Image: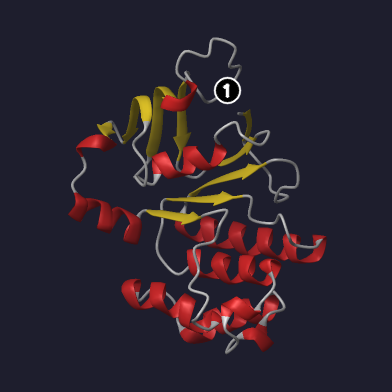
Amino acid sequence: MHVIELQQVLPEVFAGNDRITSDVWHRQLAFQKGQKYLVEAASGTGKSSLCSFIYGYRKDYQGILSFDGENIRNISVSRWVEIRKRSLSMLFQELRLFEELTAWENVQLKNNLTGYKKRSEIRQWFEELGIADKWDRKVGQMSFGQQQRVAFIRSLCQPFDFIFLDEPISHLDDGNGRCMARILTEEAARQGAGIIVTSIGKHLELAYDRVLSL
């Protein structure tokens, strides 16, 4: 996948609102592989909806959203499985971790599907992000900031052309934020992938190619 294109896309809930001012909604916009994007937004402007639309999780929008020129509404369930396994990674704001499983078990679920990372590589990320001692801790017993780091590591356990991160450091200190930015930059560069980060204020410090206002 090389281009994600939005053509006059608008959440249905915003239909009829003529006062929307946005670099994303109701515009012609293309996210290019290999580029870094920051989508800045106020709460309630639809940033999480944007992620869900692109991930194919929700379809309550107007306009056309396409991958390399193909309308994603035409993509079959089986192809979505492969896209989410090989081309598109997502770190949702609400994380979507299994609280009854340990940190390692949550990451292992993804990695078993893709076979992408060695256990030693994952262990190293746990070390670098300061959660090595939480490896066998149930996620439900961890702080939200610790859970964010687990979900981040899980999102890297697959090949991807684009990775979306919805408010990935809202509960992290600056040191862990910088560490996450470094790991993300290295992994995306290795794959020549695009990065799209959303934020309502605090955001990953990356060398963004474009900053968009939602």
Report x, y in % for residue 160. 41, 56
Residue at the top extreme?
Answer: 18
**Quick check: 50 left or right of 71?**
right
Q: Is residue 134 visible?
A: yes
Residue at 48%, 76% in the rendered image: 107
Position in image of residue 173 (x %, y %): 80, 63
Left or right: where 172 falls relative to 187: right
Asked if residue 173 lies left or right of residue 148, the reply is right
Q: Can the viewer see residue 11 in this picture?
A: no
Q: Which residue corresponds to the image point at 54% horizontal and 9% vertical from the top-left? A: 18
**Quarter placement of the C terminus:** top right
- Could you tell me the amino acid type at mark 1? Asp
Q: Is residue 144 above or below residue 119?
A: above
Residue 181 x/y as whole percent = 67, 58
Look at the picture and state if 50 lies above or below 159: above
Quarter of the image where one finds residue 52: top left
Q: Quadrant of the N terminus?
A: top left
Where is mark 1, residue-wise? 23
- Check disc 1: other Cα within 10 Å, few if <14, some if 14-19, many if 20+: some
Residue at image location 69% in from the left, 76% down from the top: 128
